[in-house]
């Protein structure tokens, strides 16, 4: 992809945001990233967005509105419902995983704790965005 990969990240943890950005850079991924850190701000972003992202990456554990509700909201917005979506969260609960796929998530990954894990996450993001 010659143009920057447009990523919409929904994540409240600054360390996780920075780790993902560094992993993308370390993997030579040219990207732009819009970040929303609070669940109640997602609907506003979706309404006001003028350039659609190539991929959405979202956490489930967010302040103010839970990721399950956010996922449902994203998939209800006409322009966003077909954008590839990766749930990237700490939860390994079968209910969360099943719900994510039922609601239209393309991939569900637990947050990595190693460099290899972050590299695998970056590979998954790029794959979703360019398919």
Image (cartoon, helix red, strand yellow):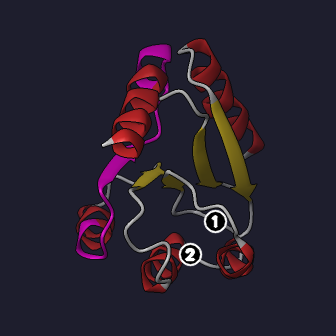
31 with respect to 56 (left or right): right
Q: What residue sits right under mark 1 in the picture?
A: 62
Element type where label 2 sits in the image: loop
Residue at 42 percent of width and 24 percent of height: 117
Q: How many marks?
A: 2
Find residue 66 and name its label. Answer: 2
Q: Are marks 1 and 2 in contact (CB under 8 Å)?
A: yes
The answer to which quarter of the image holds residue 59 is: bottom right
- In space, the residues marked 1 and 2 are separated at their CA atoms by 6 Å
Residue at 57 percent of width and 15 percent of height: 28
Residue at 42 percent of width and 62 percent of height: 83
How far from the left and from the top, in percent, is residue 54? 50, 51
How far from the left and from the top, in percent, is residue 12? 71, 55
Mark 1 closeness class: few <14, some 14–19, many ≥20 residues within 10 Å? many
- Tell me where the magenta segment starts and ends, as one range: 101-117
Element type where label 1 sits in the image: loop
Residue at 67 percent of width and 30 percent of height: 21
Does 47 appear above or below 22?
A: below
Does 35 appear above or below 69?
A: above
58 with respect to 85 (left or right): right
Residue 32 in magenta stretch: no
């Amino acid at each position: 992809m010659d143009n920057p990969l447009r990523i919409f990240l929904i994540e409240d943890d600054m360390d996780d945001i920075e780790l993902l950005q560094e992993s993308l850079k370390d993997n030579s991924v040219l990207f732009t990233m819009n970040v929303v850190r609070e669940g109640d701000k997602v609907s506003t972003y979706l309404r006001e967005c003028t350039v659609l992202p190539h991929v959405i990456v979202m956490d489930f554990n967010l302040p103010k509105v839970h990721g399950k509700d956010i996922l449902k909201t994203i998939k209800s917005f006409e322009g966003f419902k077909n954008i590839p979506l990766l749930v990237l969260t700490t939860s390994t609960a079968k209910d969360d995983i099943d719900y994510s796929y039922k609601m239209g998530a393309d991939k569900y990954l637990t947050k990595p704790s190693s460099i290899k894990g972050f590299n695998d996450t970056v590979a998954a993001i790029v794959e979703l965005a360019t398919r």
